[in-house]
Every structure is written in C-alpha cells, then in structure tokens.
Amino acid sequence: MATDPKRVLDAGEVRERLARELPGWSLAGDAIQRTIRTAGWKASLMVTATIGHLAEVAWHHPDLRVSWGEVEVTLTSHDAGGVTERDLAMARRIDEVVGWRPGDEDGPFSGTPDDPRFAYLPPPDD
C-alpha cells in the first residue's frame, strides 16, 4: 500500500524522521526548518538560487530568510496544512545539493581553491 504524499505527519513522526534522516532540520510549528550557514552574501544568494530551482521543479514553495552568512529554510505543505512526505523529500534534496562537496577527483568538479576568499560554505566542522 503506497503512502499518501499529502498526509500530514504528526509531530512525533516528524521529530523521529528528522532525527533519523535529516539531523540538520527541526520541527517548527507546522513546518520543518533548517539554517544553512554560508561564507557570506554571495554564497547566501547562491544557496537561495539553488533552493529556488529545486523548489520550482518540485512545485514546492519554501519560505526563505536570506542574510549575509546564512539562509533559513522553512518547509511546509500549505495545501495539506502541515509537514508531509513532500517536505521531507524536499529537505533531503536541499541537503544533497547544497551540502555537496567535491571529492579528490580531478576534473571540473575539484572545488574552489583552499582560500577563504573563495569559500562557498564553511567547512563541515565549523
């Protein structure tokens, strides 16, 4: 039996799923929320544009608060009145795309120079 993607998840279920699957996110009323730290204004704009693209292709409408060193993302399914599987999927995709870091591979995805002037997101341990 398939799960109804528009079913509003209860608070306990949301908290449990966030702890297990999306530890950077928290429950905030009838939404889930995460603050993504950035390396400054241009990085905040890049994160915002990336989330905007993901939201558009998913036909989702997150609330974003953009500032110099962070982007706060709030997700809720307005049409359903709370957090649904759709919000968790969107959060997962945001984490995958925004949090992606280049590996040690050669080629065009080797990353920016190890210099704070070129930083996009702070190192994971910051």
Image (spheres, grey):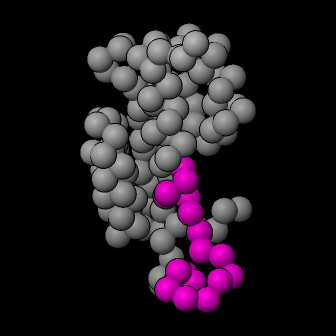
Residue visible at 63% across and 16% down? 13
Q: Which of the 4 quarters of the picture holds residue 86?
A: top left
Q: Residue at 49% of width from left, 57% of height from top?
A: 97
| Residue 15 included in the magenta stretch of the image | no
User: Does residue 68 appear in the picture of this structure?
Assistant: no
Q: Nearer the viewer, residue 71 or 77?
A: 77
58, 50: nearer the viewer = 58
- Count every numbered label the image shows and give the total: 0
Pick the front one: 55 or 38: 55
> Where's residue 66, x and y in %?
34, 51
Residue 107 belongs to magenta span? yes
Q: Which residues are magenta?
A: 95-113
The quarter of the picture where residue 26 lies is: top right
Q: Position of residue 2 (x, y in %)?
A: 54, 17
Q: Image quadrant for the C terminus? A: bottom right
Give how far across and how far down residue 52 sits, in percent. Answer: 30, 50
In this orientation, does residue 96 appear?
A: yes
Q: Nearer the viewer, residue 9 or 63?
A: 9
Quadrant where the image shows the N terminus: top right
Vertical placement of residue 46 versus 66, above or below: below
